[in-house]
Image (cartoon, rainbow, N blue to C red):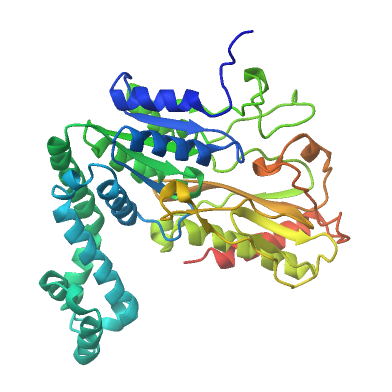
Amino acid sequence: MPTPEFVVGRQAEVALFDDLLAGRTPYRWLEIYGPGGIGKTVVGGKLLGHAQARGIPMAAVDGIQPDLTPDRILGLFMTGLTASPAGEKLADGLRAFDRQFRDYLIVNQVLQQGGGIAALFDVVGNVNDPAGLGSILGGLGGAVTEAVKRTASNRFAMERYLRGAERALTSSFMNGLAAGLTELRRPVALLIDTYEEMEGLDDWVCRTLAPGLPPEARLVILGRNELHRVNFDWSEHGDAVSSHVLFAPWLATSDLAGSLCGNVNDLFVGTNRGGQVTYHGPGQVVAYPLIDLKRAGYFVKEYVYRIEEAVIRTLGVFGVTGHRVAGAPGIYVRLDDPGSHALLPQRPLKASPLYGGQIAIKSEPDFSGLGKIAALGIKVSRNCTYHGVALNVAMDLEPFSRINPCGYTGLQTVDLSTIGVSVGWAEAADVLSRKLAAYLAP
Protein backbone atom coordinates (compact mmCIF):
# COMPACT_ATOMS: atom_id res chain seq x y z
CA MET A 1 0.00 0.00 0.00
CA PRO A 2 1.56 3.35 -1.03
CA THR A 3 2.44 5.81 1.70
CA PRO A 4 0.14 8.85 1.54
CA GLU A 5 1.77 12.15 0.71
CA PHE A 6 0.15 13.82 3.73
CA VAL A 7 -0.77 11.94 6.89
CA VAL A 8 -2.66 12.66 10.07
CA GLY A 9 -0.24 14.16 12.59
CA ARG A 10 1.24 16.79 10.27
CA GLN A 11 4.65 15.11 10.17
CA ALA A 12 5.20 16.44 6.63
CA GLU A 13 5.03 20.00 7.93
CA VAL A 14 7.28 19.16 10.89
CA ALA A 15 9.81 17.66 8.43
CA LEU A 16 9.72 20.85 6.35
CA PHE A 17 10.30 22.88 9.49
CA ASP A 18 13.18 20.67 10.56
CA ASP A 19 14.84 21.15 7.17
CA LEU A 20 14.35 24.90 7.56
CA LEU A 21 15.98 24.93 11.00
CA ALA A 22 18.88 22.79 9.81
CA GLY A 23 19.63 25.06 6.88
CA ARG A 24 18.88 22.35 4.31
CA THR A 25 16.60 24.67 2.32
CA PRO A 26 17.38 27.62 0.04
CA TYR A 27 14.70 29.63 1.83
CA ARG A 28 14.64 31.13 5.33
CA TRP A 29 10.93 31.97 5.47
CA LEU A 30 8.25 29.30 5.23
CA GLU A 31 4.58 29.98 4.62
CA ILE A 32 1.99 27.28 5.35
CA TYR A 33 -1.49 28.21 4.14
CA GLY A 34 -4.91 26.67 3.70
CA PRO A 35 -8.64 27.24 4.33
CA GLY A 36 -10.16 27.88 7.73
CA GLY A 37 -10.64 24.88 10.01
CA ILE A 38 -7.94 22.76 8.34
CA GLY A 39 -5.65 22.74 11.38
CA LYS A 40 -3.05 25.47 10.92
CA THR A 41 -2.98 26.24 14.63
CA VAL A 42 -2.40 22.54 15.35
CA VAL A 43 0.54 22.69 12.95
CA GLY A 44 1.84 25.74 14.81
CA GLY A 45 1.70 23.84 18.09
CA LYS A 46 3.61 20.91 16.60
CA LEU A 47 6.30 23.23 15.24
CA LEU A 48 6.67 24.87 18.64
CA GLY A 49 6.94 21.48 20.29
CA HIS A 50 9.55 20.35 17.77
CA ALA A 51 11.63 23.48 18.31
CA GLN A 52 11.46 23.01 22.08
CA ALA A 53 12.53 19.37 21.77
CA ARG A 54 15.55 20.46 19.73
CA GLY A 55 16.42 23.28 22.11
CA ILE A 56 15.70 25.93 19.47
CA PRO A 57 14.37 29.26 20.83
CA MET A 58 11.04 30.03 19.18
CA ALA A 59 8.42 32.73 19.66
CA ALA A 60 4.86 32.91 18.36
CA VAL A 61 2.41 35.73 17.68
CA ASP A 62 -1.25 35.18 16.82
CA GLY A 63 -2.81 37.62 14.37
CA ILE A 64 -6.09 37.73 16.28
CA GLN A 65 -4.51 39.44 19.26
CA PRO A 66 -6.05 42.92 19.67
CA ASP A 67 -4.18 46.12 18.85
CA LEU A 68 -1.22 44.49 17.14
CA THR A 69 1.33 46.95 15.83
CA PRO A 70 4.87 46.35 14.56
CA ASP A 71 6.36 47.38 17.91
CA ARG A 72 4.07 45.13 19.91
CA ILE A 73 4.83 42.21 17.59
CA LEU A 74 8.55 42.72 18.21
CA GLY A 75 7.88 42.88 21.95
CA LEU A 76 6.02 39.56 21.83
CA PHE A 77 8.84 37.99 19.83
CA MET A 78 11.37 39.17 22.40
CA THR A 79 9.33 37.77 25.29
CA GLY A 80 8.86 34.42 23.57
CA LEU A 81 12.48 34.04 22.52
CA THR A 82 14.00 34.89 25.88
CA ALA A 83 11.58 32.51 27.64
CA SER A 84 12.51 29.64 25.29
CA PRO A 85 15.22 27.04 25.93
CA ALA A 86 18.64 28.71 25.78
CA GLY A 87 16.82 32.04 25.55
CA GLU A 88 18.95 33.50 28.31
CA LYS A 89 21.75 33.77 25.76
CA LEU A 90 19.52 36.01 23.66
CA ALA A 91 18.49 38.17 26.59
CA ASP A 92 21.78 40.06 26.80
CA GLY A 93 21.69 40.96 23.13
CA LEU A 94 18.08 42.12 23.37
CA ARG A 95 18.55 44.10 26.59
CA ALA A 96 18.72 47.48 24.83
CA PHE A 97 15.56 46.69 22.86
CA ASP A 98 13.82 45.57 26.03
CA ARG A 99 14.62 48.89 27.69
CA GLN A 100 13.48 50.91 24.66
CA PHE A 101 10.30 48.87 24.31
CA ARG A 102 9.40 49.38 27.99
CA ASP A 103 9.88 53.13 27.48
CA TYR A 104 7.62 52.95 24.43
CA LEU A 105 4.85 51.26 26.44
CA ILE A 106 5.18 53.86 29.21
CA VAL A 107 4.99 56.73 26.70
CA ASN A 108 1.79 55.23 25.32
CA GLN A 109 0.35 54.93 28.82
CA VAL A 110 1.13 58.60 29.41
CA LEU A 111 -0.66 59.53 26.19
CA GLN A 112 -3.65 57.35 27.04
CA GLN A 113 -4.03 58.63 30.60
CA GLY A 114 -3.40 62.22 29.50
CA GLY A 115 -6.04 62.16 26.77
CA GLY A 116 -3.64 62.35 23.82
CA ILE A 117 -1.19 64.94 22.53
CA ALA A 118 -3.78 67.68 22.05
CA ALA A 119 -4.91 67.38 25.67
CA LEU A 120 -1.41 67.15 27.13
CA PHE A 121 0.21 70.06 25.28
CA ASP A 122 -0.70 73.52 24.01
CA VAL A 123 -0.13 74.67 20.42
CA VAL A 124 3.37 75.99 21.15
CA GLY A 125 4.46 72.69 22.69
CA ASN A 126 4.26 73.37 26.43
CA VAL A 127 2.58 71.04 28.91
CA ASN A 128 -0.99 72.20 29.57
CA ASP A 129 -1.14 70.86 33.11
CA PRO A 130 2.32 70.20 34.62
CA ALA A 131 0.83 69.01 37.90
CA GLY A 132 -1.47 66.60 36.08
CA LEU A 133 1.37 65.25 33.97
CA GLY A 134 3.48 64.88 37.10
CA SER A 135 0.69 62.91 38.71
CA ILE A 136 0.49 60.58 35.70
CA LEU A 137 4.23 60.00 35.71
CA GLY A 138 4.27 59.52 39.47
CA GLY A 139 1.50 56.97 39.24
CA LEU A 140 3.57 54.90 36.83
CA GLY A 141 6.28 54.59 39.47
CA GLY A 142 9.85 53.53 38.93
CA ALA A 143 9.15 52.37 35.37
CA VAL A 144 9.42 55.99 34.21
CA THR A 145 12.96 56.61 32.98
CA GLU A 146 14.67 59.94 32.38
CA ALA A 147 14.27 59.33 28.64
CA VAL A 148 10.49 59.06 29.08
CA LYS A 149 10.42 62.25 31.15
CA ARG A 150 12.32 64.15 28.46
CA THR A 151 9.95 62.84 25.78
CA ALA A 152 6.88 63.85 27.81
CA SER A 153 8.20 67.32 28.61
CA ASN A 154 7.43 68.89 25.24
CA ARG A 155 4.92 68.36 22.44
CA PHE A 156 7.54 68.44 19.70
CA ALA A 157 9.79 65.98 21.52
CA MET A 158 6.79 63.67 21.86
CA GLU A 159 5.87 63.97 18.19
CA ARG A 160 9.45 63.32 17.08
CA TYR A 161 9.61 60.27 19.32
CA LEU A 162 6.36 58.82 18.00
CA ARG A 163 7.35 59.39 14.36
CA GLY A 164 10.60 57.50 14.82
CA ALA A 165 9.56 54.88 17.37
CA GLU A 166 8.71 52.09 14.95
CA ARG A 167 11.92 52.51 12.97
CA ALA A 168 14.07 52.78 16.09
CA LEU A 169 12.50 49.76 17.79
CA THR A 170 12.75 47.62 14.67
CA SER A 171 16.43 48.50 14.24
CA SER A 172 17.14 47.84 17.92
CA PHE A 173 15.39 44.44 17.79
CA MET A 174 17.27 43.34 14.67
CA ASN A 175 20.65 44.44 16.07
CA GLY A 176 19.96 42.84 19.44
CA LEU A 177 18.79 39.58 17.87
CA ALA A 178 21.92 39.45 15.67
CA ALA A 179 24.13 39.99 18.73
CA GLY A 180 22.31 37.30 20.68
CA LEU A 181 22.57 34.81 17.81
CA THR A 182 26.33 35.30 17.72
CA GLU A 183 26.41 34.11 21.33
CA LEU A 184 23.76 31.39 20.84
CA ARG A 185 25.37 29.72 17.79
CA ARG A 186 22.14 28.09 16.64
CA PRO A 187 19.07 29.28 14.71
CA VAL A 188 15.92 30.76 16.19
CA ALA A 189 12.38 30.64 14.79
CA LEU A 190 9.58 33.19 14.73
CA LEU A 191 6.00 32.08 14.07
CA ILE A 192 3.01 34.20 13.01
CA ASP A 193 -0.34 32.38 13.20
CA THR A 194 -3.73 33.46 11.81
CA TYR A 195 -1.91 35.81 9.43
CA GLU A 196 -5.12 36.69 7.58
CA GLU A 197 -6.22 38.66 10.64
CA MET A 198 -3.23 40.99 10.43
CA GLU A 199 -2.90 41.47 6.67
CA GLY A 200 -3.07 45.20 7.29
CA LEU A 201 0.48 44.81 8.60
CA ASP A 202 1.58 42.71 5.64
CA ASP A 203 3.59 45.52 4.03
CA TRP A 204 5.64 45.86 7.22
CA VAL A 205 6.18 42.09 7.50
CA CYS A 206 7.12 41.83 3.81
CA ARG A 207 9.30 44.93 3.48
CA THR A 208 10.75 45.40 6.97
CA LEU A 209 10.48 42.41 9.31
CA ALA A 210 11.37 39.50 7.01
CA PRO A 211 14.28 41.11 5.10
CA GLY A 212 15.65 42.68 8.29
CA LEU A 213 15.99 39.40 10.19
CA PRO A 214 19.52 38.01 10.69
CA PRO A 215 20.38 35.01 8.45
CA GLU A 216 20.14 32.61 11.42
CA ALA A 217 16.52 33.61 12.13
CA ARG A 218 13.73 31.58 10.50
CA LEU A 219 10.23 32.95 9.92
CA VAL A 220 7.10 30.75 9.64
CA ILE A 221 3.74 32.25 8.63
CA LEU A 222 0.45 30.35 9.02
CA GLY A 223 -2.57 31.83 7.26
CA ARG A 224 -5.46 31.29 4.90
CA ASN A 225 -4.05 33.06 1.87
CA GLU A 226 -0.93 32.51 -0.21
CA LEU A 227 1.46 35.39 0.50
CA HIS A 228 2.10 36.56 -3.05
CA ARG A 229 -1.66 36.69 -3.60
CA VAL A 230 -2.00 38.88 -0.52
CA ASN A 231 0.85 41.12 -1.68
CA PHE A 232 2.72 40.59 -4.94
CA ASP A 233 5.76 42.23 -3.36
CA TRP A 234 6.52 38.89 -1.67
CA SER A 235 7.55 37.63 -5.10
CA GLU A 236 10.48 40.06 -5.05
CA HIS A 237 12.12 37.97 -2.31
CA GLY A 238 12.57 35.07 -4.74
CA ASP A 239 13.98 31.87 -3.20
CA ALA A 240 14.10 33.37 0.30
CA VAL A 241 10.43 32.43 0.84
CA SER A 242 8.62 29.16 0.14
CA SER A 243 4.86 28.48 0.20
CA HIS A 244 3.43 25.16 1.31
CA VAL A 245 -0.27 24.33 0.87
CA LEU A 246 -1.79 22.68 3.94
CA PHE A 247 -3.98 19.79 2.83
CA ALA A 248 -6.67 18.26 4.96
CA PRO A 249 -5.48 14.74 5.86
CA TRP A 250 -8.72 13.28 4.50
CA LEU A 251 -8.43 14.98 1.09
CA ALA A 252 -6.50 13.84 -1.94
CA THR A 253 -4.28 16.43 -3.61
CA SER A 254 -6.73 16.81 -6.51
CA ASP A 255 -9.52 17.63 -4.07
CA LEU A 256 -7.82 20.65 -2.49
CA ALA A 257 -10.70 23.06 -2.68
CA GLY A 258 -11.49 23.44 1.00
CA SER A 259 -13.86 26.29 0.36
CA LEU A 260 -15.69 24.66 -2.58
CA CYS A 261 -18.37 22.00 -2.58
CA GLY A 262 -20.68 20.37 -5.09
CA ASN A 263 -20.01 21.30 -8.70
CA VAL A 264 -16.66 23.09 -8.80
CA ASN A 265 -16.44 23.38 -12.59
CA ASP A 266 -17.62 26.98 -12.66
CA LEU A 267 -15.42 29.99 -13.28
CA PHE A 268 -13.36 30.85 -10.20
CA VAL A 269 -11.07 33.86 -10.21
CA GLY A 270 -8.15 34.22 -7.81
CA THR A 271 -7.73 37.56 -6.05
CA ASN A 272 -5.25 39.05 -3.60
CA ARG A 273 -7.80 40.22 -1.05
CA GLY A 274 -8.27 38.82 2.43
CA GLY A 275 -10.77 36.07 3.13
CA GLN A 276 -11.64 32.88 1.28
CA VAL A 277 -14.09 32.19 -1.54
CA THR A 278 -17.22 34.23 -2.18
CA TYR A 279 -19.70 34.79 -5.00
CA HIS A 280 -20.67 37.95 -6.89
CA GLY A 281 -23.74 38.12 -9.08
CA PRO A 282 -26.75 40.20 -10.22
CA GLY A 283 -28.86 41.64 -7.42
CA GLN A 284 -25.86 42.25 -5.18
CA VAL A 285 -24.49 45.71 -4.36
CA VAL A 286 -20.69 45.60 -4.49
CA ALA A 287 -18.71 48.59 -3.20
CA TYR A 288 -14.92 48.88 -3.40
CA PRO A 289 -13.77 51.94 -1.40
CA LEU A 290 -10.39 53.36 -2.36
CA ILE A 291 -9.09 54.99 0.83
CA ASP A 292 -5.68 56.33 1.81
CA LEU A 293 -5.76 55.22 5.45
CA LYS A 294 -2.83 57.42 6.41
CA ARG A 295 -4.62 60.48 5.08
CA ALA A 296 -7.94 59.36 6.58
CA GLY A 297 -6.30 58.99 10.00
CA TYR A 298 -7.41 55.49 10.99
CA PHE A 299 -6.03 51.95 10.86
CA VAL A 300 -7.17 48.75 9.18
CA LYS A 301 -9.27 47.36 12.03
CA GLU A 302 -11.14 50.64 12.34
CA TYR A 303 -11.57 50.70 8.54
CA VAL A 304 -13.22 47.27 8.66
CA TYR A 305 -15.38 48.39 11.59
CA ARG A 306 -16.49 51.50 9.67
CA ILE A 307 -17.47 49.48 6.59
CA GLU A 308 -19.43 47.06 8.76
CA GLU A 309 -21.12 49.97 10.53
CA ALA A 310 -22.14 51.47 7.18
CA VAL A 311 -23.77 48.15 6.23
CA ILE A 312 -25.50 47.88 9.61
CA ARG A 313 -26.90 51.41 9.21
CA THR A 314 -28.01 50.61 5.66
CA LEU A 315 -29.90 47.56 6.84
CA GLY A 316 -31.47 49.64 9.60
CA VAL A 317 -33.06 51.91 6.97
CA PHE A 318 -34.96 48.85 5.74
CA GLY A 319 -35.95 47.64 9.22
CA VAL A 320 -33.30 44.94 9.49
CA THR A 321 -30.80 44.59 12.35
CA GLY A 322 -27.30 43.62 11.26
CA HIS A 323 -24.95 41.85 13.65
CA ARG A 324 -21.20 41.26 13.88
CA VAL A 325 -19.84 37.82 14.76
CA ALA A 326 -16.54 37.65 16.63
CA GLY A 327 -13.73 36.42 14.41
CA ALA A 328 -15.81 36.38 11.19
CA PRO A 329 -15.85 39.72 9.33
CA GLY A 330 -19.10 40.55 7.58
CA ILE A 331 -22.65 41.28 8.64
CA TYR A 332 -25.21 38.69 9.73
CA VAL A 333 -28.95 38.67 10.48
CA ARG A 334 -31.12 36.51 12.71
CA LEU A 335 -33.08 34.13 10.49
CA ASP A 336 -36.00 33.85 12.91
CA ASP A 337 -36.31 37.59 13.56
CA PRO A 338 -34.30 39.83 11.18
CA GLY A 339 -35.37 42.94 13.08
CA SER A 340 -34.26 41.72 16.51
CA HIS A 341 -31.81 43.92 18.43
CA ALA A 342 -30.97 41.20 20.96
CA LEU A 343 -27.22 40.65 21.40
CA LEU A 344 -25.71 37.52 19.93
CA PRO A 345 -24.13 35.01 22.33
CA GLN A 346 -20.49 35.52 21.41
CA ARG A 347 -18.00 32.76 22.07
CA PRO A 348 -15.01 34.22 23.95
CA LEU A 349 -11.34 34.03 23.05
CA LYS A 350 -9.44 31.43 25.02
CA ALA A 351 -5.81 30.95 25.95
CA SER A 352 -3.99 28.14 24.19
CA PRO A 353 -1.57 25.85 26.05
CA LEU A 354 0.27 25.51 22.74
CA TYR A 355 1.61 29.00 23.25
CA GLY A 356 2.23 28.76 26.97
CA GLY A 357 -1.08 30.45 27.71
CA GLN A 358 0.25 33.77 26.40
CA ILE A 359 -1.66 33.92 23.14
CA ALA A 360 -5.39 33.91 22.55
CA ILE A 361 -6.61 31.36 20.02
CA LYS A 362 -10.05 32.02 18.66
CA SER A 363 -12.88 29.56 18.88
CA GLU A 364 -14.74 28.80 15.68
CA PRO A 365 -17.43 31.45 15.17
CA ASP A 366 -20.94 30.38 16.14
CA PHE A 367 -23.37 30.95 13.25
CA SER A 368 -26.37 29.22 14.87
CA GLY A 369 -29.60 30.80 13.68
CA LEU A 370 -27.76 33.34 11.52
CA GLY A 371 -27.50 34.10 7.82
CA LYS A 372 -24.75 36.14 6.19
CA ILE A 373 -26.13 39.10 4.27
CA ALA A 374 -22.94 41.06 3.57
CA ALA A 375 -19.38 39.86 2.93
CA LEU A 376 -16.11 41.74 3.42
CA GLY A 377 -12.85 41.09 1.62
CA ILE A 378 -10.25 43.83 1.63
CA LYS A 379 -6.62 44.39 0.73
CA VAL A 380 -4.34 47.15 1.98
CA SER A 381 -1.08 48.02 0.26
CA ARG A 382 1.07 51.03 1.15
CA ASN A 383 -1.79 52.28 3.37
CA CYS A 384 -4.26 52.28 0.45
CA THR A 385 -7.35 50.06 0.40
CA TYR A 386 -9.03 48.17 -2.38
CA HIS A 387 -11.58 45.37 -2.74
CA GLY A 388 -14.44 45.90 -0.28
CA VAL A 389 -17.96 44.82 0.62
CA ALA A 390 -20.90 43.05 -1.04
CA LEU A 391 -24.49 43.44 0.21
CA ASN A 392 -27.02 40.85 -0.97
CA VAL A 393 -30.27 42.52 -2.05
CA ALA A 394 -32.34 40.29 -4.37
CA MET A 395 -30.28 37.64 -6.10
CA ASP A 396 -30.11 34.00 -7.06
CA LEU A 397 -28.56 32.46 -3.95
CA GLU A 398 -28.05 29.00 -5.49
CA PRO A 399 -24.35 29.57 -6.38
CA PHE A 400 -23.63 30.04 -2.66
CA SER A 401 -24.62 26.39 -2.15
CA ARG A 402 -21.57 25.40 -4.23
CA ILE A 403 -19.10 27.13 -1.92
CA ASN A 404 -18.36 27.44 1.77
CA PRO A 405 -18.68 31.23 2.10
CA CYS A 406 -15.45 32.70 3.50
CA GLY A 407 -14.28 29.14 4.18
CA TYR A 408 -16.99 28.33 6.77
CA THR A 409 -18.75 25.02 6.10
CA GLY A 410 -22.54 25.24 6.29
CA LEU A 411 -22.72 29.02 6.66
CA GLN A 412 -26.08 30.11 5.22
CA THR A 413 -26.22 33.11 2.90
CA VAL A 414 -29.32 35.29 2.65
CA ASP A 415 -30.40 38.48 0.92
CA LEU A 416 -32.93 41.18 1.77
CA SER A 417 -35.54 39.50 -0.42
CA THR A 418 -35.17 36.17 1.43
CA ILE A 419 -35.88 37.78 4.80
CA GLY A 420 -38.97 39.57 3.50
CA VAL A 421 -37.63 42.99 2.54
CA SER A 422 -38.68 44.16 -0.93
CA VAL A 423 -36.29 46.84 -2.14
CA GLY A 424 -34.77 47.61 -5.50
CA TRP A 425 -31.06 47.32 -6.24
CA ALA A 426 -30.78 51.04 -7.06
CA GLU A 427 -32.35 52.11 -3.77
CA ALA A 428 -30.16 49.78 -1.72
CA ALA A 429 -27.06 50.93 -3.62
CA ASP A 430 -27.93 54.57 -3.02
CA VAL A 431 -28.39 54.08 0.73
CA LEU A 432 -25.21 52.03 1.09
CA SER A 433 -23.13 54.53 -0.89
CA ARG A 434 -24.33 57.40 1.30
CA LYS A 435 -23.64 55.45 4.52
CA LEU A 436 -20.16 54.48 3.30
CA ALA A 437 -19.38 58.09 2.44
CA ALA A 438 -20.47 59.17 5.92
CA TYR A 439 -18.73 56.44 7.94
CA LEU A 440 -15.49 56.37 5.95
CA ALA A 441 -14.99 60.13 6.21
CA PRO A 442 -11.87 61.17 8.21
Judge by depth and name the residue closer to the eye, 85 or 158: 85
Q: Is residue 173 above or below residue 306?
A: above
In the rendered image, is residue 260 in sight? yes
In the rendered image, is residue 198 in sight? no
Q: Quadrant of residue 96?
A: bottom left
- Residue that protrudes farthest toward the front in the picture: 53
Q: Is residue 117 above or below residue 72?
A: below
Q: Quadrant of residue 321?
A: bottom right
For image coordinates 13% across by 36% down, the residue present is 182
Q: Is residue 22 above or below residue 170?
A: above
Q: How many marks?
A: 0
Judge by depth and name the residue closer to the eye, 69 or 143: 143
Q: Quadrant of residue 8?
A: top right
Viewed as shown, does residue 281 lie left or right of 233? Answer: right
Location of residue 133 in the rendering, given as x and y in whole percent from the top left corner: 23, 85
Location of residue 408 in the rendering, given as x and y in whole percent from the top left corner: 68, 43
Location of residue 102 in the rendering, given as x and y in whole percent from the top left corner: 23, 64
Location of residue 329 in the rendering, given as x and y in whole percent from the top left corner: 61, 54
Viewed as shown, does residue 91 lie left or right of 297? Answer: left
Viewed as shown, does residue 68 lie left or right of 21? Answer: right
For image coordinates 64% across by 25% down, the residue present is 256
Judge by depth and name the residue closer to the eye, 358 or 258: 358
Which quadrant of the rendered structure holds the N terminus? top right
For image coordinates 65% across by 61% down, the residue present is 324
